[in-house]
Amino acid sequence: FLSICPWRDAKQSISTIPVKRKPSCNQCHEWWDILTNPSSSAMRWMLLNRFFYNIRNAMTVSSITYYLTYVRNVPTDTLGTGLAVVTLLGLLSGLLGTVLWGVVLGSHTQDKTKTFDPKWYMVAFTITSDVVWCLLLGTWAGPVERNVDGTAWPYAVSMSLTIFVSSIYGNWNTAANGGAIDEDCQLMAAATGKASKRREAQFAGLALLVRGLGSMVGILIIGTQMGLPGMAGVCNTELSGKDNTMDCARGLWYLWMIGAPVLNLFVALTAMMYPIYGERLKQVIAKQGEIHKVIPGTKAFKGVARGATAGATESQMVKVAADAVVLIGVAKKEEGKGSTVEEEGRWTTGTKCVTSMGAG
Protein backbone atom coordinates (compact mmCIF):
# COMPACT_ATOMS: atom_id res chain seq x y z
CA PHE A 1 0.00 0.00 0.00
CA LEU A 2 2.97 2.32 0.36
CA SER A 3 3.34 1.93 -3.41
CA ILE A 4 -0.08 3.43 -4.15
CA CYS A 5 1.22 6.96 -4.72
CA PRO A 6 3.98 5.95 -7.17
CA TRP A 7 1.49 3.75 -9.03
CA ARG A 8 -0.91 6.67 -9.30
CA ASP A 9 1.52 8.27 -11.72
CA ALA A 10 1.33 5.23 -14.00
CA LYS A 11 -2.40 5.88 -14.61
CA GLN A 12 -2.94 2.29 -15.66
CA SER A 13 -6.50 2.02 -14.38
CA ILE A 14 -8.98 0.29 -16.65
CA SER A 15 -12.20 -1.57 -16.02
CA THR A 16 -15.16 -3.04 -17.88
CA ILE A 17 -17.38 -0.98 -15.58
CA PRO A 18 -18.80 1.86 -17.73
CA VAL A 19 -17.83 4.68 -15.40
CA LYS A 20 -15.62 7.73 -15.81
CA ARG A 21 -11.98 6.70 -15.95
CA LYS A 22 -10.22 7.06 -12.61
CA PRO A 23 -6.54 7.26 -11.71
CA SER A 24 -5.07 4.01 -10.42
CA CYS A 25 -4.76 5.16 -6.80
CA ASN A 26 -7.59 2.80 -5.77
CA GLN A 27 -5.56 -0.40 -5.62
CA CYS A 28 -8.31 -2.39 -3.93
CA HIS A 29 -10.59 -1.71 -6.91
CA GLU A 30 -7.88 -2.77 -9.36
CA TRP A 31 -7.04 -5.91 -7.41
CA TRP A 32 -10.70 -6.89 -7.11
CA ASP A 33 -11.10 -6.43 -10.85
CA ILE A 34 -8.09 -8.68 -11.53
CA LEU A 35 -9.47 -11.32 -9.16
CA THR A 36 -12.97 -11.33 -10.68
CA ASN A 37 -12.77 -10.17 -14.30
CA PRO A 38 -13.04 -12.96 -16.91
CA SER A 39 -10.29 -11.33 -18.98
CA SER A 40 -7.80 -11.82 -16.12
CA SER A 41 -8.03 -15.62 -15.76
CA ALA A 42 -4.39 -16.14 -16.75
CA MET A 43 -3.32 -13.60 -14.12
CA ARG A 44 -5.23 -15.52 -11.46
CA TRP A 45 -3.57 -18.82 -12.36
CA MET A 46 -0.19 -17.09 -12.10
CA LEU A 47 -1.10 -15.72 -8.66
CA LEU A 48 -2.18 -19.16 -7.45
CA ASN A 49 1.00 -20.67 -8.88
CA ARG A 50 3.09 -18.09 -7.06
CA PHE A 51 1.20 -18.75 -3.82
CA PHE A 52 2.14 -22.45 -3.75
CA TYR A 53 5.67 -21.70 -4.94
CA ASN A 54 6.25 -19.26 -2.08
CA ILE A 55 4.80 -21.57 0.54
CA ARG A 56 7.32 -24.20 -0.51
CA ASN A 57 10.14 -21.69 -0.87
CA ALA A 58 9.59 -20.12 2.56
CA MET A 59 9.15 -23.50 4.23
CA THR A 60 12.44 -24.84 2.90
CA VAL A 61 14.63 -21.72 2.93
CA SER A 62 13.61 -20.76 6.48
CA SER A 63 14.45 -24.23 7.77
CA ILE A 64 17.84 -24.92 6.16
CA THR A 65 19.64 -24.25 9.45
CA TYR A 66 17.17 -26.49 11.29
CA TYR A 67 17.64 -29.27 8.76
CA LEU A 68 21.42 -29.20 9.07
CA THR A 69 21.29 -28.99 12.87
CA TYR A 70 18.51 -31.43 13.76
CA VAL A 71 18.25 -33.77 10.77
CA ARG A 72 21.82 -33.95 9.54
CA ASN A 73 23.25 -33.48 13.07
CA VAL A 74 25.97 -31.10 11.84
CA PRO A 75 28.13 -29.92 14.79
CA THR A 76 27.83 -26.24 15.66
CA ASP A 77 31.52 -25.58 14.96
CA THR A 78 31.06 -26.58 11.29
CA LEU A 79 27.48 -25.37 10.83
CA GLY A 80 28.53 -21.96 9.47
CA THR A 81 30.73 -23.55 6.84
CA GLY A 82 27.93 -25.94 5.93
CA LEU A 83 25.48 -23.06 5.46
CA ALA A 84 28.00 -21.23 3.28
CA VAL A 85 28.47 -24.32 1.10
CA VAL A 86 24.70 -24.84 0.75
CA THR A 87 24.15 -21.18 -0.16
CA LEU A 88 27.02 -20.97 -2.63
CA LEU A 89 26.23 -24.23 -4.44
CA GLY A 90 22.53 -23.39 -4.54
CA LEU A 91 23.12 -19.95 -6.05
CA LEU A 92 25.64 -21.22 -8.59
CA SER A 93 23.46 -24.12 -9.73
CA GLY A 94 20.42 -21.85 -10.04
CA LEU A 95 22.40 -19.27 -12.00
CA LEU A 96 23.88 -21.89 -14.32
CA GLY A 97 20.49 -23.47 -14.95
CA THR A 98 18.84 -20.11 -15.68
CA VAL A 99 21.56 -19.15 -18.16
CA LEU A 100 21.40 -22.54 -19.92
CA TRP A 101 17.62 -22.33 -20.22
CA GLY A 102 17.95 -18.79 -21.50
CA VAL A 103 20.18 -20.06 -24.29
CA VAL A 104 17.85 -22.99 -25.07
CA LEU A 105 14.67 -20.94 -25.01
CA GLY A 106 16.09 -17.82 -26.62
CA SER A 107 14.78 -17.02 -30.08
CA HIS A 108 16.75 -15.25 -32.77
CA THR A 109 13.85 -15.00 -35.20
CA GLN A 110 12.12 -11.68 -35.79
CA ASP A 111 8.76 -13.50 -35.87
CA LYS A 112 7.80 -13.54 -32.18
CA THR A 113 4.94 -15.98 -32.84
CA LYS A 114 7.64 -18.64 -33.26
CA THR A 115 9.04 -18.00 -29.79
CA PHE A 116 9.73 -21.20 -27.84
CA ASP A 117 7.00 -21.84 -25.23
CA PRO A 118 8.55 -23.34 -22.04
CA LYS A 119 5.26 -24.32 -20.34
CA TRP A 120 5.35 -28.10 -20.71
CA TYR A 121 9.11 -28.23 -20.18
CA MET A 122 8.62 -26.36 -16.92
CA VAL A 123 5.92 -28.82 -15.80
CA ALA A 124 8.04 -31.84 -16.73
CA PHE A 125 11.21 -30.58 -15.04
CA THR A 126 9.33 -29.49 -11.92
CA ILE A 127 7.98 -33.01 -11.48
CA THR A 128 11.43 -34.45 -12.28
CA SER A 129 12.98 -32.24 -9.60
CA ASP A 130 10.57 -33.76 -7.08
CA VAL A 131 11.72 -37.25 -8.04
CA VAL A 132 15.39 -36.26 -7.76
CA TRP A 133 14.72 -34.56 -4.42
CA CYS A 134 12.95 -37.56 -2.88
CA LEU A 135 15.56 -40.02 -4.10
CA LEU A 136 18.49 -38.01 -2.74
CA LEU A 137 16.91 -37.12 0.61
CA GLY A 138 15.62 -40.65 1.01
CA THR A 139 18.91 -42.42 0.34
CA TRP A 140 21.73 -40.00 1.05
CA ALA A 141 20.80 -36.76 2.82
CA GLY A 142 18.32 -38.07 5.38
CA PRO A 143 18.39 -38.13 9.20
CA VAL A 144 21.61 -39.01 11.02
CA GLU A 145 21.60 -41.03 14.25
CA ARG A 146 21.97 -38.86 17.37
CA ASN A 147 25.33 -40.35 18.36
CA VAL A 148 26.91 -39.60 14.97
CA ASP A 149 28.25 -36.29 13.67
CA GLY A 150 26.82 -35.53 10.25
CA THR A 151 28.04 -33.28 7.42
CA ALA A 152 26.31 -30.73 5.21
CA TRP A 153 27.72 -32.07 1.93
CA PRO A 154 25.01 -34.64 1.07
CA TYR A 155 22.32 -32.05 1.70
CA ALA A 156 24.18 -29.31 -0.19
CA VAL A 157 24.68 -31.49 -3.27
CA SER A 158 21.07 -32.75 -3.17
CA MET A 159 19.64 -29.24 -2.97
CA SER A 160 21.94 -27.93 -5.72
CA LEU A 161 20.99 -30.71 -8.14
CA THR A 162 17.30 -30.15 -7.44
CA ILE A 163 17.64 -26.38 -7.97
CA PHE A 164 19.44 -26.98 -11.25
CA VAL A 165 16.77 -29.37 -12.53
CA SER A 166 13.95 -26.98 -11.62
CA SER A 167 15.73 -23.78 -12.71
CA ILE A 168 13.48 -23.40 -15.76
CA TYR A 169 10.78 -22.10 -13.40
CA GLY A 170 12.18 -18.57 -13.42
CA ASN A 171 12.26 -18.44 -17.23
CA TRP A 172 8.71 -19.77 -17.51
CA ASN A 173 7.40 -17.48 -14.76
CA THR A 174 8.75 -14.38 -16.50
CA ALA A 175 7.32 -15.39 -19.88
CA ALA A 176 3.94 -16.46 -18.43
CA ASN A 177 3.53 -13.26 -16.43
CA GLY A 178 4.16 -11.24 -19.59
CA GLY A 179 1.64 -13.28 -21.55
CA ALA A 180 -1.01 -12.90 -18.84
CA ILE A 181 -0.55 -9.13 -18.69
CA ASP A 182 -0.55 -8.82 -22.48
CA GLU A 183 -3.79 -10.78 -22.87
CA ASP A 184 -5.47 -8.85 -20.06
CA CYS A 185 -4.44 -5.65 -21.83
CA GLN A 186 -5.94 -6.82 -25.13
CA LEU A 187 -9.19 -8.23 -23.74
CA MET A 188 -9.87 -5.16 -21.63
CA ALA A 189 -9.36 -2.93 -24.66
CA ALA A 190 -11.80 -5.06 -26.64
CA ALA A 191 -14.35 -5.02 -23.80
CA THR A 192 -14.25 -1.27 -23.23
CA GLY A 193 -13.65 -0.14 -26.79
CA LYS A 194 -11.09 2.33 -25.46
CA ALA A 195 -7.35 2.67 -25.66
CA SER A 196 -5.87 0.00 -23.42
CA LYS A 197 -3.92 0.69 -20.25
CA ARG A 198 -1.39 -1.91 -19.17
CA ARG A 199 -2.01 -3.17 -15.61
CA GLU A 200 1.49 -4.47 -14.98
CA ALA A 201 2.02 -2.36 -11.86
CA GLN A 202 -1.26 -3.47 -10.31
CA PHE A 203 -0.54 -7.12 -11.06
CA ALA A 204 2.97 -6.82 -9.61
CA GLY A 205 1.56 -5.37 -6.40
CA LEU A 206 -1.00 -8.14 -6.07
CA ALA A 207 1.71 -10.73 -6.77
CA LEU A 208 3.80 -9.26 -3.95
CA LEU A 209 0.82 -9.54 -1.60
CA VAL A 210 0.30 -13.19 -2.60
CA ARG A 211 4.02 -13.87 -2.16
CA GLY A 212 3.88 -12.44 1.35
CA LEU A 213 0.86 -14.56 2.25
CA GLY A 214 2.50 -17.69 0.84
CA SER A 215 5.70 -17.02 2.75
CA MET A 216 3.75 -16.56 5.97
CA VAL A 217 1.99 -19.91 5.49
CA GLY A 218 5.34 -21.62 4.80
CA ILE A 219 6.87 -20.25 8.00
CA LEU A 220 3.79 -21.31 9.99
CA ILE A 221 4.19 -24.85 8.68
CA ILE A 222 7.76 -24.95 9.95
CA GLY A 223 6.52 -23.43 13.19
CA THR A 224 4.36 -26.47 13.84
CA GLN A 225 7.56 -28.51 14.01
CA MET A 226 9.93 -26.00 15.63
CA GLY A 227 7.42 -24.23 17.87
CA LEU A 228 5.43 -20.99 17.76
CA PRO A 229 4.60 -18.41 20.44
CA GLY A 230 2.41 -20.24 22.95
CA MET A 231 2.81 -23.59 21.18
CA ALA A 232 5.60 -26.09 21.82
CA GLY A 233 7.17 -27.79 18.83
CA VAL A 234 8.43 -31.31 18.35
CA CYS A 235 12.02 -30.05 18.45
CA ASN A 236 13.53 -28.28 21.44
CA THR A 237 15.55 -25.42 19.97
CA GLU A 238 17.28 -24.84 23.30
CA LEU A 239 19.12 -28.14 22.83
CA SER A 240 21.67 -29.24 20.25
CA GLY A 241 20.86 -31.72 17.53
CA LYS A 242 22.42 -34.60 19.43
CA ASP A 243 20.29 -33.91 22.50
CA ASN A 244 17.01 -33.87 20.53
CA THR A 245 15.07 -36.99 19.73
CA MET A 246 14.83 -38.77 16.40
CA ASP A 247 11.17 -37.67 16.32
CA CYS A 248 12.46 -34.13 15.83
CA ALA A 249 14.79 -35.22 13.03
CA ARG A 250 12.18 -37.33 11.26
CA GLY A 251 9.48 -34.66 11.60
CA LEU A 252 11.59 -32.10 9.76
CA TRP A 253 12.69 -34.71 7.26
CA TYR A 254 9.07 -35.63 6.47
CA LEU A 255 8.27 -31.97 5.82
CA TRP A 256 11.08 -31.87 3.26
CA MET A 257 10.45 -35.35 1.87
CA ILE A 258 6.65 -35.12 1.60
CA GLY A 259 5.50 -31.54 2.20
CA ALA A 260 7.88 -29.80 -0.20
CA PRO A 261 7.28 -32.23 -3.14
CA VAL A 262 3.49 -32.03 -2.68
CA LEU A 263 3.63 -28.23 -2.81
CA ASN A 264 5.83 -28.50 -5.89
CA LEU A 265 3.21 -30.71 -7.54
CA PHE A 266 0.66 -27.94 -6.98
CA VAL A 267 3.10 -25.55 -8.65
CA ALA A 268 3.24 -27.89 -11.65
CA LEU A 269 -0.56 -28.35 -11.64
CA THR A 270 -1.30 -24.61 -11.66
CA ALA A 271 1.24 -24.20 -14.45
CA MET A 272 -0.63 -26.87 -16.42
CA MET A 273 -3.85 -24.89 -15.94
CA TYR A 274 -2.25 -21.68 -17.24
CA PRO A 275 -4.34 -21.09 -20.38
CA ILE A 276 -2.04 -19.07 -22.65
CA TYR A 277 -0.08 -21.53 -24.79
CA GLY A 278 -0.09 -22.93 -28.31
CA GLU A 279 -2.35 -21.09 -30.73
CA ARG A 280 -3.69 -18.80 -28.01
CA LEU A 281 -0.16 -17.64 -27.21
CA LYS A 282 0.52 -16.95 -30.89
CA GLN A 283 -2.63 -14.84 -31.10
CA VAL A 284 -1.64 -12.82 -28.05
CA ILE A 285 1.80 -12.14 -29.52
CA ALA A 286 0.38 -11.25 -32.93
CA LYS A 287 -2.18 -8.80 -31.50
CA GLN A 288 0.12 -7.13 -29.00
CA GLY A 289 1.51 -4.76 -31.61
CA GLU A 290 -1.90 -3.12 -31.88
CA ILE A 291 -2.00 -2.50 -28.13
CA HIS A 292 1.54 -1.98 -26.92
CA LYS A 293 3.41 0.77 -28.75
CA VAL A 294 7.03 -0.02 -29.51
CA ILE A 295 10.01 2.15 -30.39
CA PRO A 296 10.83 2.36 -34.12
CA GLY A 297 14.08 0.67 -35.09
CA THR A 298 14.14 -1.85 -32.22
CA LYS A 299 13.82 -5.63 -32.54
CA ALA A 300 10.41 -5.45 -30.88
CA PHE A 301 9.33 -2.95 -33.54
CA LYS A 302 10.37 -5.31 -36.34
CA GLY A 303 9.13 -8.50 -34.71
CA VAL A 304 5.58 -7.69 -33.64
CA ALA A 305 2.63 -7.44 -36.04
CA ARG A 306 1.31 -3.90 -36.39
CA GLY A 307 -2.30 -4.45 -37.31
CA ALA A 308 -3.33 -2.34 -40.31
CA THR A 309 0.25 -1.31 -40.97
CA ALA A 310 1.77 -4.79 -40.71
CA GLY A 311 2.96 -4.73 -44.30
CA ALA A 312 4.57 -1.31 -44.18
CA THR A 313 8.30 -0.74 -44.41
CA GLU A 314 10.22 0.55 -41.41
CA SER A 315 10.66 3.99 -42.98
CA GLN A 316 6.89 4.23 -43.52
CA MET A 317 6.24 3.19 -39.95
CA VAL A 318 8.65 5.82 -38.63
CA LYS A 319 6.76 8.38 -40.75
CA VAL A 320 3.49 7.27 -39.13
CA ALA A 321 5.07 7.54 -35.68
CA ALA A 322 6.26 11.05 -36.48
CA ASP A 323 2.75 12.01 -37.62
CA ALA A 324 1.40 10.82 -34.29
CA VAL A 325 3.90 12.97 -32.39
CA VAL A 326 2.84 16.02 -34.39
CA LEU A 327 -0.79 15.23 -33.64
CA ILE A 328 -0.02 15.06 -29.92
CA GLY A 329 1.24 18.64 -30.16
CA VAL A 330 -1.90 19.73 -31.99
CA ALA A 331 -4.07 18.06 -29.37
CA LYS A 332 -2.22 19.89 -26.60
CA LYS A 333 -2.79 23.22 -28.32
CA GLU A 334 -6.48 22.47 -28.77
CA GLU A 335 -6.99 21.54 -25.12
CA GLY A 336 -8.41 24.92 -24.24
CA LYS A 337 -10.87 24.82 -27.16
CA GLY A 338 -12.98 21.93 -25.94
CA SER A 339 -10.99 19.17 -27.63
CA THR A 340 -11.89 15.64 -26.52
CA VAL A 341 -8.70 14.07 -27.85
CA GLU A 342 -7.05 13.56 -24.46
CA GLU A 343 -10.32 12.51 -22.87
CA GLU A 344 -10.75 9.70 -25.34
CA GLY A 345 -7.06 8.83 -25.22
CA ARG A 346 -6.83 7.92 -28.93
CA TRP A 347 -7.10 9.48 -32.35
CA THR A 348 -6.71 8.64 -36.03
CA THR A 349 -4.48 10.26 -38.65
CA GLY A 350 -4.95 10.27 -42.36
CA THR A 351 -2.63 7.26 -42.57
CA LYS A 352 -5.07 5.12 -40.53
CA CYS A 353 -2.67 4.95 -37.58
CA VAL A 354 -4.40 4.67 -34.21
CA THR A 355 -2.28 5.50 -31.18
CA SER A 356 -2.75 6.58 -27.57
CA MET A 357 -1.60 9.18 -25.07
CA GLY A 358 0.36 6.58 -23.11
CA ALA A 359 4.06 6.69 -22.35
CA GLY A 360 4.77 4.85 -25.60
Image (tube, rainbow, N blue to C red):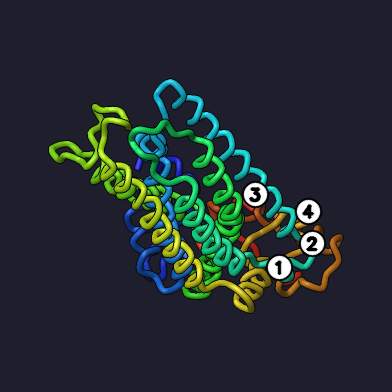
Badge 1 crowding class, 10 Å Cα cut-off, few under 14, some 14 to 19, many 20 or more, is some
Residue at the disc numbered 4: 298
**Residue type at tag 2:** Lys
Does any portion of residue 224 appear in the rendered image? yes
Distance (Cα) linking label 3 and label 1: 40 Å
Residue at the disc numbered 3: 98
**Residue type at tag 1:** Cys
Judge depth for marks 3 and 1 and give the one in front: 3
Residue at coordinates 64% horizontally, 53% vertically from top-left?
A: 360
* Residue 222 at x, y percent in the picture: 30, 44
Residue at the disc numbered 1: 353
Among the 4 quarters of the image, the one containing residue 13: bottom left
Q: Secondary structure at mark 2?
A: helix
Badge 2 crowding class, 10 Å Cα cut-off, few under 14, some 14 to 19, many 20 or more, is some
**Residue type at tag 4:** Thr
Looking at the rendered image, the quarter that the N terminus falls into is top left
Question: Earlier along the polypeptide chain: callout 4 or callout 1?
Answer: 4
Distance (Cα) linking label 1 and label 2: 17 Å
Distance (Cα) linking label 3 and label 4: 25 Å
Residue at coordinates 36% horizontally, 64% vertically from top-left?
A: 35
| 327 sits to left or right of 206 | right
Give the answer, above or below, for where 71 lies relative to 338.
Answer: above
* Residue 257 at x, y percent in the picture: 40, 54
Question: Earlier along the polypeptide chain: callout 3 or callout 1?
Answer: 3
| Residue situated in front as seen by the camera: 174 or 185 | 174
Give the answer, above or below, for where 102 lies relative to 77.
Answer: below
Residue at the disc numbered 2: 302
